[in-house]
Image: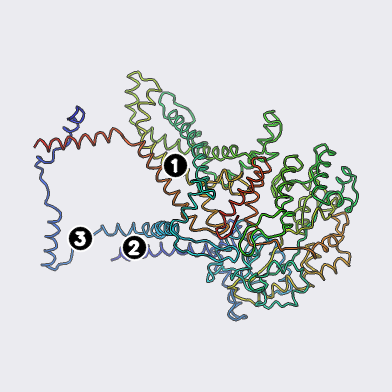
Amino acid sequence: MLDGTAAQIFERVPNTENCQMPVARPRAEIFREGCEKMANTKTKRKTVEYSRYGYFFIAPFFIVFAIFQLWPLIYTMGLAFCENYTDTMFNMEVGPYFNGLANFKTVFVGNDGRLFNTYTFQSLWNTIIMWLMNFLPQILLALILAVWFTDTRVKLKAQGAYKILTFMPNIITAATISVLFYKLFDFPNGPINQVLTSWGVLSQPYNFFLSKWATRGIVSFINFWMWYGNTMIVLTAGVLGISPSLFEAARVDGASSWQIFKSVTLPMLRPIMLFTLVNSAIGGLQMYDIPKLLTTSGYGDPDYTTRTMTMYIRDLAFTGSKQMGKAAAASLILFVVTLFFSLVLFYIMRDKDAIKEKKAIKAAQKARKGAK
Amino acid sequence: MKKKVISVLLSTAMVASLLVGCGSSSDNAAPAADDGAAAETTEEAPAEEAAPAEDAAADTTASGDKFYIYSWNTELQERLKFVTDAHPELADRIEYVNVGDSAIYQEKIDQLLQTPDAEDYPDMIAFEAGYIMKYTNSDFTLPVADCGVTEADLAEMYPYTITIATDKRDGSLKGVSWQACPGSFMYRTDLAESILGVTSPEEMQAKIGSWDDFLDTAREIKEKSGDATRILSSNGDVTEVFKSNKTEPWVDDSGVFHMDPAMEEYMDVVKVLEQEDLTQKTTTWSDEWNAGPSTDAVFGYFGCTWFLHWTIKANCGGAAVGEGTYGLWNMCQGPVPYYWGGTWLGATAGCSDTEMAGTIMKALCCDTEIMTKMSEETLDYVNNKTAMKTLSDAGKGAYDFLGGQDFIAVFSPLAENVDVSWMSAYDQKVQELMQTQLDAYAAGEKDKETAIADFKAAVADAYPGVTVE
């Protein structure tokens, strides 16, 4: 029943049952005694209890959290089941009246009766597509750079300068970058169009913002460019956290760079990778600033193909009929999708060995108890 | 014990500084929106505010506070100078808040209107034609009669400006405007002569008397100029013309959505302009578009009274005859009569001083003398028939920017005949939804049926209370 490794592990587990350590008396007992003493002698406590000051210090966070995050969260969940919008004709608010799942029905089912054929899911796909388009190249480049920068054999020069340069776009505000790219790809006389026509790549200026893939590509590229420096620095920290002796040992054993990367760096980076992936998934699904500011109308031109989920939720809640109820339902969808993605990532990135180890320990303990 | 006192002091100081931060930022948010020196103003603000407050308390009764007027640009602020010239005592009390962006103006106002007790609750707000009905048909605004504006005060106004601002529910007037905005086609006389051989506005009108003629002329200009000149800068330039030629509103009084035939014609015309490459294909209000009037690349623009001064003249590349394209412009009616925009001013339900609101309205929008002066100085086409007639009779309409053409004489008959039965509270948003589909249709991404179906779906999505069949 026990395999080799499990047995070894088991040996290392301290055997608490047989151990006769000089254990202090249980706390409850001391406490009871203390109470009795106090009741009997009626003396004032000599010691100051510091623990409650700790609660005072963390209280502001919880108060702010409850007012500005927890309550809105609960309120949103409630609104999602209510009819609540403003009638434009007379500018009068309707509701909120409870209307069950009606909001979710309009979120899930399109006018033609087809499931998922709604603006909500269209914007969700847009978000996921644009996130993947920027995230995959971003993590690859960041990983390569992180490995190069930390490689003791390569020893790149002027790393600091390069790190600053790659981090720069992240410091500039999204609004500035959006305007910059909007101008770069301007039609018909933007710099990109001028360069491409003068080089003969294009025979005439091309209106990038009328093509959905060009616009999505630009949005993705901006996000990629803004965030790869950040990801790189996080990953560099992760690689530096790996014990150098592992790399040395691998090198002594004659492992190639690729083998070291595959069998040492990547597995050891797992916790940092998980952090990066989950962070990026949450950030990516909430993408708002670049697509909102890049397109002229701000509604995800052309034809809503760059409208992200958060843009759509904002449009629902604050323009037109101010449909708070439907916007709340769409927000819940976003919440569920984010949760789903995070859980999937946690599952994929789980530490399989650690889980195996735990299972083996449990099994071994059981086996021991059974033997007793 | 000592420690306790110190800790209490410290924590009080911390909380107090937090509260101070909140207070000053909200007080100064509005006036200090544009200068980056918000931090410095917080220190000066109490001193500045204290002085006028005392004065006001001394000479006026309970209403010594500020009178907030909200708008989205500086236009109204400049016009208010004519009011304060006539009523200098109001100058100190008017607190003009420029929201700065007409795209977020409605959101900002909607939030403010929900909080009647707030310090910066608007006393008067400006409306644009695209959404004025949302406010005038609601209880958020006051009838102008409550501010002391009488029927007689409205006599000189162009009828359409009154129709637009009338509450559909009880027929009371909720807002007044100081300008009238009939539209025309503004074109370059030198290009008209060299390309088309046209020498007078009448001849030009004959060339663009209908949409078919307009498109033919557009093709002619493109061909004869050898692609150097296009009739318009952007496809969107025809939008306002078609918009005001709808026969019915987007959403009628019973909440039913209508796709007007004029809008289908609009889609066709834009598609031809796009596919046959008849415009410069810029985006309206972009830098490229704004640069148009100073070059020979654009033949003309559809524009109205304010457009002439604020857009074409401002971008013509000169300030006197001979500089840039100054003096090389003329106006004619174009394919159909239309009107574009305009700003109305109304008092809010919680207006702190209706008498003052009435004074401002009367001075800005009813007083013939002030309005004559305003039109003469700013060349704005004011909402006052007598004023415009006086100026026209006095020959003040001849405008050197238009090569001596009398702009008042062109606009006057147009202003009398503006029909606004097509307007609804939904216009601005619905128009945006339409534009998205139109762009896709014109670019050839969709056929017309799909574009219209998608447009209707978008309207239904944005307005749950509207019936879309």
Residue B77's x, y, as percent?
A: 68, 64
Between B406 and A230, the one nearer to me in the picture: B406
What residue would you read off at disc 3? A47
Q: Quadrant of the N terminus of chain A?
A: top left
* A248 with respect to B229 (left or right): left
Same chain, marks 3 and 2?
Answer: no
Residue type, mark 1 in image = Ala
Judged from the image, the secondary structure of the residue bearing numbered disc 1 is helix
Question: Mark 1 sits on what residue?
Answer: A281
For mark 1, name the chain: A
**How many numbered circles are shown?**
3
Q: Secondary structure at mark 2?
A: helix
- Amino acid carrying label 3: it is Thr
Mark toward the viewer: 3 or 1: 1
Mark 1 residue crowding within 10 angstroms, few (<14) / some (14–19) / many (20+): many
Image mark 3: chain: A
Q: Position of residue B106 (x, y in %)?
A: 60, 60
- Residue at position x 61%, y 62% in the image: B255
Q: Are marks 2 and 1 in contact (CB under 8 Å)?
A: no
x 28%, y 66%: residue = B1
Left or right: A172 in relation to B3:
right
User: x and y percent of residue A205 in the render?
Assistant: 70, 35
Query: How much space separates mark 3 and mark 1, taking CA atoms?
Result: 49 Å
Tell me if I can see residue B51 in this picture.
Answer: no
Question: Foreground residue, A290 or B426?
Answer: B426
Residue marked by disc 2: B7
Q: CA distance from mark 3 to mark 2?
A: 19 Å
Crowding at dot 2, Cα within 10 Å, few <14 / some 14-19 / many 20+, comes out as few
